[in-house]
Image: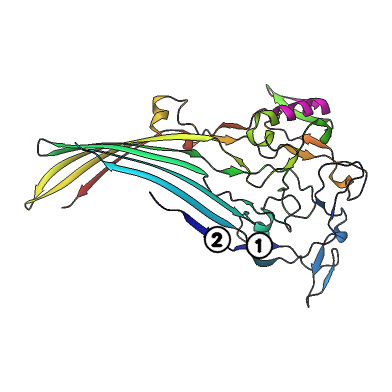
Amino acid sequence: MRGFIIRISILLFFVNEGIQGADYLNLTTGYPDNRLIYPVALNARYYYLQTGGVLLPAGTGGVSPIVLENRKGGYYWSATAKLEKTLSQGFAAMIAYTHSEARNLVDGSGDQASSAWNGNANVNGANDPELSYASYITPNKLISAISYRIEYLKYFGTSISLFYEGGSGGRFSYTYASNIVRDGAGSNNLIYIPRDASEINFVNQTVTTTINGVSTNLVWTAQAQSDAFFRYLKQDKYLSSHQGQYAERNGAQYPWSNRVDLQLKQDFFVNVGGKRNTIQLSLDILNFCNLLNKNWGLVPFYNQNQILKMANNTSVVAGGSVNPTFQLNPWNNTMLTKTFSNNLSYTSTYSIQLGIRYIFN
């Protein structure tokens, strides 16, 4: 059994110092989502950096600066338990379980400071990151293998192995389909998950759909969208257990998935210069269970993580009396009904590969 591994990391934090003027919503109607929000007017929320280091309001030229800082708080740890045994008569077996967790301040990806700053999911804007789950961790993983090898008739050897891997395939975030904080970053503001219909206001929207080559405009009423939204919340394990809270960055997890690989190896022994060399043929069937049954070995993936879009973004101001209104974000021109579907790609299909090699002794 392996011991615990604990790692403490210092992460780069991307800060756009060119933003000003944010305030909490503090809506007079007691609206439950009281996050930071920036003014609508560009010159009320941006400073531009001019030559000589002078900060001036937006519209006067220059560029908005990005400042990189070191921040503490992120960490990673994992624990693994493993059993391995070589059995009699050519059998061997192994099983291992790993649990991992990592949290960081900035989980965005990008090839430069601005794109990394834009890509970090948040509640109060990209300048106010929260310590939350990292996306690159598989929280739970179970692997096992069993093999059998036999040599016979002096010139032949046969091996067969089965490899199993199961686990929850990672994490993802629930964000709005637009930047409701108005900080100039990407559409990465984490949603507020309402307790009930009294905490979110839907408005009608018109969705264009094409049936048999004919485009049709459908009106989704506010009530129909509200009903569909709360049905979706009820079937979603993460959202239904966090109502009345902000969604966490990478708080939602993919379901557990299973995969079995099969390997066959046939050895032919040849005597060269008094030494035994080997010609080996191999057959690998990856995701073997999918070959046996098309419904096995499938990997789930979320249908859409941006399930809501704000309809009146420019009308909502801090301390104002206008509540945010929302619409469902269409998925394939329909109302979303379930969180996951099978990822019908290479990850969910079987594949076969053949190999040949010559082993010198």
Q: In the rendered image, which residue does mark 2 sit on? A: 8
Q: What secondary structure is marked by label 1?
A: strand
Residue at 66 percent of width and 57 percent of height: 115
Q: Is residue 166 magenta?
A: no
Residue 262 percent across, percent down from the top left: 33, 35
Quarter of the rendering containing residue 47: bottom right
Quarter of the rendering containing residue 105: bottom right
Q: Is residue 297 left or right of residue 359?
A: right
User: Alpha carbon of mark 1 to alpha carbon of mark 2: how far?
Assistant: 16 Å
What span is in magenta? Answer: 213-232
**Residue 13: numbered disc:** 1
The answer to whether residue 192 is visible is no
The vertical placement of 214 against 4, above or below, is above
Asked whether the beta carbons under mark 1 and mark 2 sit within 8 Å of each other, the answer is no
Q: Going from the N terminus, do you reach mark 1 or mark 2 first?
A: 2
Q: Which colour scheme is used?
A: rainbow
| Kind of residue at badge 1 | Phe
Q: Is residue 228 magenta?
A: yes
Q: What secondary structure is marked by label 2?
A: strand
